[in-house]
Image (cartoon, helix red, strand yellow):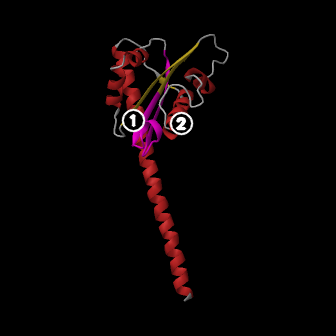
Amino acid sequence: MIRRAVCLVVLAGTAVTLLGTAASADVSARATSEQTLEAGVLGHINALRRSNGLTALRLSPALSSAARQHSFEMASRGYFAHASANGSRFDRRIARYYPMGGRRYWSVGENLLWSSPDVDASRALTMWLNSPEHRANLLTARWREIGLSAVHSAAAPGTYGGAPVTIVTTDFGVRR
């Protein structure tokens, strides 16, 4: 009888470990997919900029943090807008991560998109290029840095109707 109880405890511990491993593998695969999309978007944007005689953009950890926070907020709260969930403007949100500091000049811009979970970098760029405002942002000469975030949601609420989506935020910036 004691031997059976020990066996059940060991099996239960194994099941938890296996479930934890499967969940970790899923999260890891999703994170890798998001990173691949982000890297692809950066590569496509910089190729576009170079082909138009513009400076390539440097990846900014600060702008990427701002973009990531906004993508997660939109996915979890079910809205899609440049304004934050509390109604504040996008430049105020970005400034919390990418402050002006002691510089004399500061400017930021933002492109957003949401699409099916399998959107790739080429499709994301095409969607932005088909929008005059987004195209202008991509080809703004003053930008020097970019932050990127791609977030996949299996069932995003609100605007997304519980559907699986990918939300991409690009935050552009310059400080001099």
Q: Which residues are magenta?
A: 143-169
Residue plotted at (52% across, 85% down): 4
Q: Residue under circle 1?
A: 37
Q: CA distance from mark 2 to mark 1?
A: 19 Å
User: Which residue occupies the foreground of this view, 73 or 32?
Assistant: 73
- Residue 154 lies, with reference to residue 116, above or below; the image says below
At label 2, which amino acid type do we have? Glu
Q: Report if residue 158 lies within the magenta region.
A: yes
Q: Are marks 2 and 1 in contact (CB under 8 Å)?
A: no
Residue plotted at (55% across, 34% down): 69
User: Which residue occupies the foreground of this view, 8 or 167?
Assistant: 167
Residue plotted at (52% across, 34% down): 68
User: Which residue occupies the foreground of this view, 16 or 56?
Assistant: 16
- Percent coordinates x, y for residue 162 in the rendering: 42, 44
- Neighbour tally class for label 2: few under 14, some 14-19, many 20 plus, Cα within 10 Å: some
Q: Residue under circle 2?
A: 73
- Percent coordinates x, y for residue 146 in the rendering: 49, 24
> Counting residues from the N terminus, which is met first, the one under dot 2 or under dot 1?
1
